[in-house]
């Protein structure tokens, strides 16, 4: 009889039985989900290439350097870049708008990365949305990459602008209060 269990990546599955049992290993102890080689291997084994997914755009040449109060044209769409709103270890985030869509100018974010990280993020986000399906109430809580622009040097991911920040900002906000 199983009383409780917990699973953690790179560790054993510990189940507490009425009788003792040996733990089962799920991943090898050297498993590193952030290893570039592992990501490339996983992306190379997909049954359908990423380029066949909705929103994937292969870009020839280099991306321009984004600056505040500038414009950027990607796949025939003009983005007006307002400015940088965040930066992490692997990417810089810019707020932008799409003025060509009528009276409403939707706000978007442009996530600029200079490594394979953008391809991996595009894959994970699109795969989560595909597996959750449009009817799932959880699907709205998972990031959706509307468009991903990729070249040999990096990527620009286009997402809907969410005015309430991100999970890290929320955690830091409450951590400072405690």
Image (cartoon, helix red, strand yellow):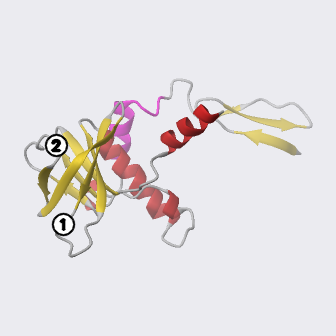
Q: CA distance from mark 2 to mark 1?
A: 17 Å
Which residue is at the front of the view, 101 or 22? Answer: 101
Q: Label 1: how many residues lie within 10 Å, few (<14), some (14-19) or many (20+)?
A: some
Residue 76, by quadrant, is bottom left
Q: Quadrant of the N terminus?
A: top right
Residue on which disc 1 sits: 99
Q: Are marks 2 and 1 in contact (CB under 8 Å)?
A: no
Q: Residue at x 35, y 44 (%)?
A: 120
Which secondary structure lies at badge 2?
loop
Residue 75: give x, y in percent of width and height. 14, 61
Give x and y (percent) for residue 17.
87, 38
Q: Earlier in the sequence, mark 2 or mark 1?
A: 2
Does residue 137 appear left or right of residue 42 in this picture? right
Looking at the rendering, the stretch of residues picked out in magenta corresponds to 32-43
Q: Residue at x 7, y 45 (%)?
A: 61
Disc 2: which residue: 66
Q: Position of residue 105 (x, y in %)?
A: 25, 67
Q: The residue tagged with tag 1: helix, strand or loop?
A: loop
Q: Which residue is most to the left?
A: 61
Our reading of the magenta stretch's main secondary structure is helix
Q: Nearer the viewer, residue 12 or 115?
A: 115
């Amino acid at each position: 009889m199983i009383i409780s269990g917990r699973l953690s990546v790179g560790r054993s599955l510990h189940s507490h039985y009425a009788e003792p049992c040996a733990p089962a290993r799920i991943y090898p102890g050297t498993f590193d989900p952030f290893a570039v080689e592992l990501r490339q291997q996983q992306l190379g084994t997909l049954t359908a290439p990423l380029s066949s997914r909705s929103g994937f755009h292969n870009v020839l040449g280099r991306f321009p350097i984004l600056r505040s109060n500038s414009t950027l044209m990607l796949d025939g769409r003009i983005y007006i870049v307002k400015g940088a709103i965040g930066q992490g270890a692997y990417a810089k985030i810019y707020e932008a708008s799409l003025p060509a869509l009528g009276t409403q100018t939707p706000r978007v974010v442009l996530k600029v990365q200079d490594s394979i990280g953008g391809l991996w993020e595009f894959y994970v986000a699109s795969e989560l949305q595909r597996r959750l399906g449009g009817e799932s109430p959880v699907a709205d809580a998972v990031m959706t990459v509307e468009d991903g622009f990729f070249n040999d040097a990096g990527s620009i991911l286009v997402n809907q602008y969410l005015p309430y920040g991100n999970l890290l900002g929320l955690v830091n906000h409450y951590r400072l209060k405690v």
